[in-house]
Image: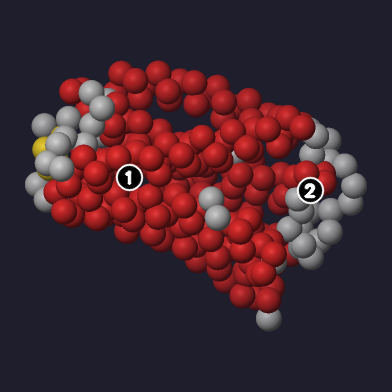
């Protein structure tokens, strides 16, 4: 029953991530806003992470499914989501510089995870821990890839909501100025975005009670759903100057 439920959660996360990605991809094709392309890439990575979790829950954990989930679920997906926040708050010039650095980071991280040796035996019934199977470098990449971008997303969303409620422009530079059609709606969207980032970072809090597999499955689904709601709400509250 537990495995079946976890499999359904992982599959649902993949479906939501794909729907989210298609929505942002459609908006990017029509408007060519770089933050929407960054979100599209992030959702592709979230979908791969969700599918690797679904694969592992359905067939049992293996070195291949663990490497995929660790790379796409713990390292490279949240940074691309954070890149969208950078584009929105700081404009295209700074965003493009961050994107170039992120491309290098993503390629380096994927190469490290693909080639790093795995220590010990993978238990097919339990989500493997990076601390038990990887050396220091993959774990450092996971810490950097999950913590710093999450702080950028959470802090940027909270700061934008605060600025909007004060009647100020939700941007750091004039290059990123947007026309706000509904300040309250934009503030609400940013609250959802901040909540989604917090949920995605909270899987470890629930692992002791729910088990690592279920906590990751639940927080992944809940976080993506809340982010999707936040992005839809915020996108409908602004227009580009």
Neighbours of disc 1 within 10 Å: few (<14), some (14-19), many (20+): some
Q: Quadrant of residue 160?
A: top left
Numbered disc in front, either 1 or 2: 1
For image coordinates 24% across by 44% down, the residue present is 162
For image coordinates 33% across by 44% down, the residue present is 157
| Nearest to N terminus: mark 1 or mark 2 | 2
Vertical side of 185 occupied by 93: above or below: above
Residue 229 placement (x, y as % from top left): 32, 58
Q: Nearer the viewer, residue 184 or 8?
A: 184
Q: Quadrant of residue 168?
A: top left
Looking at the rendering, in which quadrant would you find the C terminus? top left
Looking at the rendering, in which quadrant would you find the N terminus? bottom right
**Is there CB contact under 8 Å for labels 1 and 2?**
no
Q: Is residue 101 left or right of residue 123?
A: left
Residue 184 placement (x, y as % from top left): 16, 53
Residue 68 placement (x, y as % from top left): 66, 46
Distance between mark 1 and mark 2 Cα atoms = 38 Å
The residue that label 2 is drawn on is: 63
Residue 99 placement (x, y as % from top left): 43, 25
Circle 2 SS class: helix
For image coordinates 38% across by 40% down, the residue present is 155
The residue that label 1 is drawn on is: 158
Q: Is residue 154 left or right of residue 113?
A: left
Q: Nearer the viewer, residue 107 or 158?
A: 158
For image coordinates 26% across by 27% down, the residue present is 172
Q: For residue 123, say whether it is visible.
A: yes
């Amino acid at each position: 029953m537990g495995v079946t439920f976890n499999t359904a959660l992982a599959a649902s996360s993949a479906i939501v991530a794909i729907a989210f990605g298609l929505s942002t991809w459609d908006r990017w094709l029509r408007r060519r806003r770089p933050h929407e392309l960054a979100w599209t890439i992030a959702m592709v990575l979230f979908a791969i992470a969700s599918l690797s979790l679904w694969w592992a829950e359905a067939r049992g954990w293996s070195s291949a499914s663990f490497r995929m989930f660790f790379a796409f679920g713990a390292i490279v997906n949240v940074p691309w989501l954070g890149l969208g926040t950078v584009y929105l708050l700081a404009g295209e010039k700074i965003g493009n510089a961050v994107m170039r650095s992120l491309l290098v980071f993503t390629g380096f991280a994927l190469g490290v995870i693909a080639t790093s040796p795995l220590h010990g035996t993978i238990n097919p019934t339990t989500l493997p821990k990076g601390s038990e199977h990887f050396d220091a470098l993959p774990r450092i990449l996971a810490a950097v890839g999950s913590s710093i971008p999450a702080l950028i997303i959470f802090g940027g969303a909270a700061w934008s909501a605060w600025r909007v409620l004060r009647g100020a422009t939700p941007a750091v530079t004039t290059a990123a100025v947007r026309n706000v059609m509904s300040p309250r709606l934009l503030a609400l969207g940013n609250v959802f975005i901040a909540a989604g980032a917090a949920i995605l970072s909270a899987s470890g809090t629930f692992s002791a009670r729910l088990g690592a597999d279920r906590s990751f499955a639940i927080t992944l689904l809940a976080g993506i759903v809340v982010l999707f709601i936040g992005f839809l709400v915020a996108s409908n509250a602004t227009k580009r100057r």
